[in-house]
Structures are given as structure tokens and as C-alpha cells.
Image (cartoon, rainbow, N blue to C red):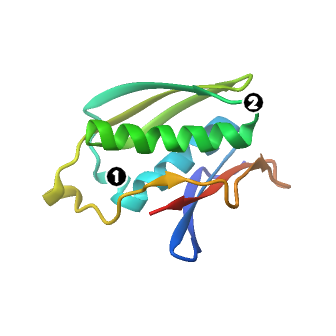
Amino acid sequence: MVSAHYEHFPHGADIGVRGIADSKAEAFAQAALALTALVTDPAGVASRTKVLLECSAPSDLLLLNDWLNRLIYEMAVRRMLFGRYEVAIDDGRLRAEAWGEPVDRDRHAPAVEPKGATLTELKVGQRDDGGWVAQCIVDV
């Protein structure tokens, strides 16, 4: 069994986000937490508001890219941060619930503003240990 977690990895002026978990859906949720962690500690984001999100794509790779870009859009338009995600993936369609709150500059101390998920180092797949990985480079 793989312990679900997220991590960052360096890439020039940008940064990579990676989600690792037992399922593809949870790996996507962990990648979303890695995205939030670029801005602030996800543990410091209160789950006050639930936002329903959906996206679809013809491949898992493009679905991850669309998912992260949708989150970046929602964070910018709603001026919110999300610290908890519940993701379901079925036949190229992602449905998710994201819980968060409005950005509080004093409390959240935003470090960077993600501009977009790129196709660089885009990867979604099952690892040798049975776990799933979902990663890409984010322009910051």
C-alpha cells in the first residue's frame, strides 16, 4: 500500500507538482494539494466552502493538465485557496469537490501565484509498487 502524499520537484524557473497514491483519483487529489502547497500550507486552509468541479479529456495526461488548470482558474476567479480535495475519475471525466476559503493574505502568506499547468514532464501512470503518480510542471 502506498502512503498518499504530494511533493514538489525543481524545474528551472518553474516547479513540478507530483501526487502519489494508491489510486489514480487520489494521485490527482494529491497533485492538487501540491498545487495549493506552492501558495501556502494546505493544512492552514479552512474547509469553509465546497466548490464542485468537473472536467473531461481524451487521455489521463490531458485530464491532469485540465484539472490543475481548472483549479488555478478557480483560485484566481474566486480568490480562494483549497486545502482538501475529493476526486472521482470515470472514463475520461473528472468530478471533484474542493473545500477551501477566501485568501487571507496575513494568515495564508501566499508565496507565489501559479499561472498555469504545463505539458512539460506531464505523467500519469501506475508505478512498479502499484501506486499511482500524477505530475507536471507548473508555471509560477
Residue 54: percent from the left, percent from the top? 53, 24
Most extreme residue toward the bottom, as rendered? 12
Most extreme residue toward the left, as rendered? 106
| Tag count | 2
Q: Classify 100 as above or below 132.
A: above
Q: In the structure shown, which secondary structural element does the residue marked by tag 1 occupy? A: helix
Alpha carbons under labels 2 and 1: distance apart: 33 Å
Residue 75 falls in image quadrant: top left
Residue 68's disc number: none
> Dot 1 surroundings within 10 Å: few (below 14), some, or many (20 or more)?
few
Q: In the structure shown, which secondary structural element does the residue marked by tag 2 occupy? A: loop
* Mark 1 residue type: Ala
Residue 130: percent from the left, percent from the top? 81, 48
Measuring 32% from the left and 44% from the top, which residue is drawn there?
76
- Residue indicated by mark 1: 43
Residue 77: percent from the left, percent from the top? 31, 38
- Residue indicated by mark 2: 58
First in sequence, mark 2 or 1: give its number. Answer: 1
Q: Answer yes or no: is residue 97 visible.
A: yes
Measuring 29% from the left and 47% from the top, which residue is drawn there?
45
Residue 9: percent from the left, percent from the top? 59, 70
* Mark 2 residue type: Pro
Measuring 37% from the left and 27% from the top, which residue is drawn there?
51
> Dot 2 surroundings within 10 Å: few (below 14), some, or many (20 or more)?
few
Which part of the image, by quadrant, shows the C terminus? bottom left
Most extreme residue toward the right, as rendered? 128
| Contact check, label 2 and label 1, Cβ < 8 Å | no
Q: Answer yes or no: is residue 23 visible.
A: no
Measuring 57% from the left and 74% from the top, which residue is drawn there?
10
Residue 79 falls in image quadrant: top left
Nearest to the eye among marks 2 and 1: give it. 2
